[in-house]
Image (cartoon, helix red, strand yellow):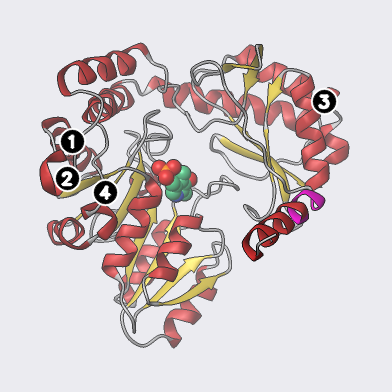
Amino acid sequence: MSEFAHRLASALEERRQQHLYRERLVLESSQGPQVRLAGREMLNFCSNDYLGLAAHPKVIEALRRGAEEYGAGSGASHLVCGHSRPHHTLEEALAEFTGRPRALLFGSGFAANTAALSVLLQAGDTVLQDRLNHASLLDGGLHSGARLSRFPHNDVEALERKLNAVSGPSMVVVDGVFSMDGDVAPLAQLAALTRRHDAWLMVDDAHGFGVLGQRGAGSLEAAGLDCEDVPVLMATLGKALGCSGAFVAGSEVLVESLVQFARNYVYSTAMPPALAVAGLAALNLLSEEGWRRAYLQNLIARFRRGAGQLGLPLADVGGPIQPLLIGAADEALALSQALRERGLLVGAIRPPTVPAGTARLRITLTASHTEAQVDQLLDALDNAGAARHAA
Ligand SMILES: *Cc1c(COP(=O)(O)O)cnc(C)c1O
């Protein structure tokens, strides 16, 4: 065997032995509270489609209309001839909705994060990141040439000590809502701290956008922060908006710098225009139908009450991501499997996605679940002995 094949095979074998091997599910239906898997209807509690928009008739209709008018693909990068009217309109709508001068679309959140960090940072700078930040933020920081420093999760004092020791330009980067823990960053404190230190703050609001804030504009709206407090905002279209893609919103000079200098913007095909038409329809639903957020909050409260009665030690978080900490990877996997046998999909999240010894079930609720489905989830957790497995 060649060195490469040998190396790959032994890494795969090691992953299997650690109960960390992952398999993809093959869905045979649209995303929703019920999905079809190998011909079987399953209740779905692991998607990020928080507002139930991924299969909303108006979003599907917008995608169809967009495809009829603009075709399947964009044909080129934004700077060549792939930037069409729907992209432009969606960017303007996102800028207005987030209260920022400009917004710029990317094909994915991963690309948006690495683009922003690589353009903003250079050698001699320091980027300070929460330990639990999304992988794309950490990768972006690593590739930027800046010194990467990680601080303990949500620990503002530890961050302040690090900032005191830094000389030269520094940037603090956090998730608004942490994707595997469901808790929120102390954004108001972080904004005050970064202002005092003349540092920039960047927030990845993939899980807050559409869910938090009076209007659904996300973590920054909930914390009452503007573009001066948080110069760089990234959010995605693939979670609460139910579509795909992402955007960075900020000042004219920030966004124009991304257009000119971000390699993964300049050298990448623009997202399909039809997807931008669908994104705009989803954004309209998000802002016009505030009941989705209120109803989701109601389901979350119902789930948390029921879990408390079952003695399930949920983390103290109020959003749609409700992790149930298990600890060992094999136990988390066994519990997820037991739920699967009962017709429920709940993801077991294991290292390296989360730190070793903190494997968990990541339960997510959406506005398209019913109260009865939440009760089914509670019953299934009870039947599968979740309380016994929980850490
Ligand atoms: C999903 C996610 C991303 C990546 O966005 P994609 O559009 O899926 O590439 C970035 N940051 C966080 C916190 C995420 O949860």
State which region is magenta: 14-18
Horizontal and vertical percent for residue 254? 19, 60
Asked whether 117 or 361 is in front, the reply is 117
Label 3 CA crowd tier, 10 Å (few <14, some 14–19, many 20+):
some
Circle number at residue 253? none
Is 194 included in the stretch rendered in magenta?
no
Check the image and report above or below for 72 versus 266: above
Query: Can you identify the residue that label 2 sits on?
Result: 78
Q: Is residue 70 left or right of residue 319?
A: left
Q: Amino acid at mark 2?
A: His
**In 3D space, how far apart are the residues under numbered discs 4 and 1 (Cα atoms)?**
15 Å
- What amino acid does circle 1 point to? His
Q: Tags 2 and 1 in contact by the CB under 8 Å rule?
A: yes
Q: Mark 2 vs mark 1: which is more N-terminal?
A: 2
Query: Residue 234 vs residue 160: left or right?
Result: left
Which sits earlier in the primary sequence, circle 4 or circle 3? Answer: 4
| Magenta-span inclusion, residue 17 | yes
Q: Main secondary structure of the magenta part?
A: helix
Location of mark 3 (residue)? 382
Q: Nearer the viewer's eye, disc 4 or disc 3?
A: 4
Label 4: few (<14), some or many (≥20) within 10 Å? some
